[in-house]
Amino acid sequence: AISRVTGRQILDSRGNPTVEVDVELTDGSIGRAAVPSGASTGANEAVELRDGDPRRFHGKGVSRAVAAVNGEIAAAVTGLDAEDQTLVDTTMVELDATKDKGRLGANAILGVSLAVVKAAASAHRLPLYRYVGGVGAQLLPVPMMNIVNGGAHADNPLDFQEFMIAPVGAGSFSEAVRMGSEVFHTLRRQLAAAGHSTNVGDEGGFAPTFGDADEALRFVVRAIEESGYRPGADITVCLDPASSEFFRDGAYVYAGEGRTRSVDEHIAYLLELAGRYPISSIEDPMAEDDFTGWRALTAQAGDRLQLVGDDVFCTDADRLQAGIDGGYANAILVKVNQIGTLTETLRTVDTARRAGYRVVLSHRSGETEDTTIADLAVATGCGQIKTGSLSRSDRTAKYNQLIRIEEELGASARYAGTSS
Ligand code: PGA
Ligand code: ZN
């Protein structure tokens, strides 16, 4: 049973405060989890509670969320069986009693939820992926590695937020990491040779002053080729334009390019890029409230492109079901802090699976050294993970954990590859 719950304020990868929770069980087992934080957040995400006191951390302190962990939540979950994750999570959801978890804070609730499952895994002397996923948890995900950062994650004029590479042709996860790292360093060399900055953005990808997506894609494809890999066969390209960020009054405003595209022009542009480059997946191609756009794009390209809903679904099973019923997207990005508990996260993964939607486990642009999502990707066998570039320890920590998991699984480990 849960015997102690301790919350504290630590820093995330952007130097902003976030919540960390330790949970101790009566047998002495301990679980620790830290909560991530987004920059291009969906409008319907569970709410992270911030203090709003401008004199401390510019208003971004989380001392109220920490107080909720140490006070109300600790009182409610102490004594509960840590193996009954559903009960623990339901207890917190009911205690909060708001739809968006804004009273206690989704950051407070998620920290406890993840620390509890980690303590329970430790009590069973099992690695987290095995405790959550059972003996069948042997599938290593294809990483979508974000090697060029734009949008809300960088100070450059790039309208699109993320340009990623997915080493689908690797024979193993560790080989995928090697391929990604090689392309990353080749790209650095090419950028430097072209007189571009090689500084990195929030997710560890380069953030040069590219003028448009075309320029970024040209560099990425050239880096894949010069590293000795076949674009489209060994390594595909994935985009996250994060289109909600530049959708205004029914149109897509490309501020960096200095032009506006109508919904139809935006769709045509995305499909044109997908035709000219080896693009396998586009996340948030349409804005979170542009449902007609989502439907139109899915009808046109859903059979040949992975279309991943991030902001539009916010990891919420009901919102996902609306997309399944309404015919938009064919995959979902799953972020634990968008919904706020492990139980609800796994329910959303289940809903996606049953509908034949693909699942991509994801980090946030604000991360910590916590590697829970690496284990969850293997536990769910979802086949894909998005966790940033090949630099910054907040990103590589997840890759490193997956390397360890692959080693531990030994001969039984399988790499999702093209089947993802
Ligand atoms: P965020 O961005 O974590 O800043 O919301 C990630 C994404 O849009 O996928
Ligand atoms: Zn996204």
Image (cartoon, rainbow, N blue to C red):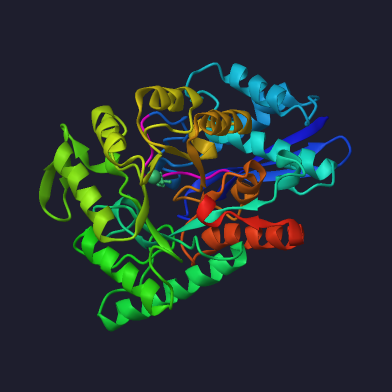
Q: Is residue 356 left or right of residue 251?
A: right
Q: Residue at x 43, y 44 (%)?
A: 38
Q: Residue at x 45, y 55 (%)?
A: 14
Image: 259 above or below 207: above
State yes or no: residue 214 in magenta.
no
Q: Is residue 175 left or right of residue 206?
A: right
Image: 237 above or below 27: below
In the picture as drawn, the residue positioned furthest to the right comes out as 27
Residue 372 or residue 367, whichever sits in front: 372
Residue 411 or residue 266, whichever sits in front: 411
Q: Quadrant of residue 208?
A: bottom left
The image position of residue 303, as x and y in percent, is: 36, 41
Image quarter (top left, top right, bottom left or bottom right) of the N terminus: top right
Image: 400 above or below 226: above
Marker count (numbered):
0
Q: Residue at x 73, y 35 (%)?
A: 5
Dominant secondary structure, magenta: loop
Q: Residue at x 28, y 59 (%)?
A: 155
Residue 329 or residue 125, whichever sits in front: 329
The image position of residue 34, as x and y in percent, is: 60, 45
The image position of residue 192, as x and y in percent, is: 31, 80
Residue 340 visible, this angle: no
- Magenta segment boundaries in residue numbering: 35-43
In the picture as drawn, the residue positioned furthest to the front comes out as 303
